[in-house]
Amino acid sequence: MTVTALVSAKSAGVTTSALAMTLSSTRPSLLAECDPAGGTIRAGLFQAQITAGTGLYHLAVAERAGEDALAQAFASHLVRLDESGHRQVLPGLTDPAQAPALARSWPALAQVMRVLSDEGGYDVIIDAGRLALESGRLHSTLTPAPLLHGADLVLLVVRATDQSLALARHMTEPLRNELTDRGTGADALGVLLIEDGPRRAHEVSEALRLPVMAALPWEPDTAAYLAGTGRAPRKLIKSPLLGSARTALGHLQAAASRRALHQQYSPAQAPAVLPAPAPAPVPAVSAVPASSAAPQVAGVLQRLGQGRKDPRV
């Protein structure tokens, strides 16, 4: 399965897009709300039914308590998005002042995301929020950079407007450099286009010099429900937004699979005979085999299968 991180230069629908993708997945899915500026799902979609006692900040506290504490805490801080529990969310921070406490926990959390994807069969969607730069690089506190390093794909969410493109243009080079130096490669970077504006996909791709890997329609009614400001559509799962999100996930999974194959085989190995796999590059977080993951992620999948107490009950 895939780990996909969504980011933006400014508010462009990252959280709504992440929710739409998580809800539309045909497999178990997890949305991790990891915006250092604070989460909005708790007050939005959940209408403040989730207290501050559940969520991301408590995993940073648990990670400091010992090797097993993160695994013990992770599943208990997830909240169901549907009755089956196949779609879940990790609510984000309630206060941006909590962000510095997460700086040392991001790598361990990135390993958890990797295990959930590789061994658990989860589609993992990371809401990494608005990018912040410092001296031309991703800010060490205000951006969860290790989560981007470990993702299969990193999508810059933009609207189809000149204003959104102008803001996003300044973020593309720092992102490319970051993924080249510390991530899985610059080809992990692409665009998720929100079709709210006059610009077409090819124009967006040319303006940002990035491929448009997926697109979602602008559907105000469903978007308002996901943001917590409107009623649920009569047939939410069949709404144009969730239908397009399901298609987008298929495109993204195919793109991630192509990248994985490309990384396994060198171009010099011709297909005349079945080639032996090329030696894998020194892995970033995302390439670390689940069996060799950090000790604190052991047992995460088992605990996910044991069920959780819904904090809204």
Image (spheres, rainbow, N blue to C red):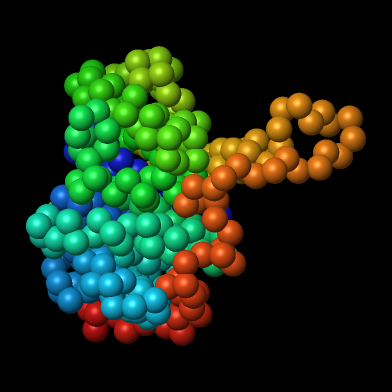
Q: Nearer the viewer, residue 231 or 201?
A: 201
Q: Nearer the viewer, residue 227 or 190?
A: 190
Q: Quadrant of residue 22?
A: bottom left
Q: Quadrant of residue 81?
A: bottom left
In the displayed structure, 21 sits above or below 262; it is: below
In the displayed structure, 286 sits above or below 247; it is: below
In the displayed structure, 64 sits above or below 267; it is: below
Is residue 117 toward the left or the right of residue 33 in the image? right
Residue 68: % across, % down = 40, 79
Residue at 32% from the left image edge and 46% from the top image edge? 145
Q: How many marks?
A: 0
Q: Quadrant of the N terminus?
A: bottom right
Q: Quadrant of residue 138?
A: top left
In the displayed structure, 88 sits above or below 12; it is: below
Query: Does residue 196 appear in the picture of this structure?
Result: no
Is residue 172 toward the left or the right of residue 2 in the image? left
Residue at 65% from the left image edge and 36% from the top image edge? 262
Is residue 248 toward the left or the right of residue 77 in the image? right
Residue at 51% from the left image edge and 64% from the top image edge? 293
Is residue 2 toward the left or the right of residue 18 in the image? right
Q: Nearer the viewer, residue 48 or 104?
A: 104
Residue 105: % across, % down = 30, 62
Q: Quadrant of the C terminus?
A: bottom left
